[in-house]
Every structure is written in structure tokens, then in C-alpha cells.
Amino acid sequence: MERQAMQNNSNSADFSEIVKRAYDKGINENEITLEKLMEDLKADLKNLLVG
């Protein structure tokens, strides 16, 4: 039970980091399109679920 709680906290931290990176990328990169940003975000989130 404790192990599962630790894993959930880790996944939450990973999720927050992925969203923060996507936000920073959207703000800082002038030539990025919404479609490219969404593709990158989806790929990162899929890797979070698999990993």
C-alpha cells in the first residue's frame, strides 16, 4: 500500500514536470505550432503511462 502511494506521488511529480516543460516550450519557442506542441505533450504523457 505504501509503495503504491509513493509511486502515485512520483507520477504526479512527473506529470507536473511534463506540463511545465510544455508550457515553457510554448512560451519560449516562437516558431512552435500548437499541433507540434500537442504531439510532444501526448508523446511525453504516453511515456509516463508506459514507464
Image: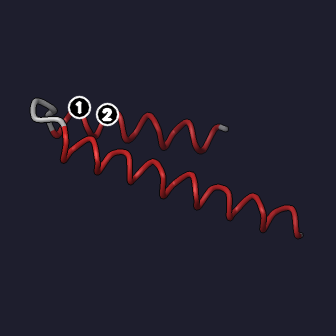
Which residue is depicted at the point 45% across and 48% down?
A: 18
Residue identified by numbered label 2: 39
Q: Amino acid at mark 2?
A: Glu
Residue 42 versus residue 36 in the image, above or below: below
The quadrant of the picture occupied by the N terminus is bottom right
Q: Which mark is residue 36?
A: 1
Which residue is depicted at the point 10% across and 30% down?
A: 31
Q: Amino acid at mark 1?
A: Lys
Q: Is residue 5 left or right of residue 50?
A: right
The quadrant of the picture occupied by the C terminus is top right
Question: What percent of the width, then of the height, locates residue 3?
Answer: 87, 62
Mark 2 neighbour class, 10 Å CA radius: few under 14, some 14 to 19, many 20 or more: few
Question: What percent of the width, then of the height, locates residue 27?
Answer: 18, 47
Question: What percent of the width, then of the height, locates residue 24?
Answer: 28, 47
Which residue is depicted at the point 47% across and 38% down?
A: 44
Q: Secondary structure at mark 1?
A: helix
Of residue 4 and residue 13, the one placed in the foreground of this image is 13
Of residue 23 and residue 34, the one placed in the foreground of this image is 23
Instruction: Give the Cα distance between marks 1 and 2.
Output: 5 Å
Residue farthest to the front, as pictured: 28
Are the residues at dot 1 and dot 2 in contact (C-beta closer than 8 Å)?
yes
State which quadrant residue 34 falls in. top left
State which quadrant residue 26 falls in. top left
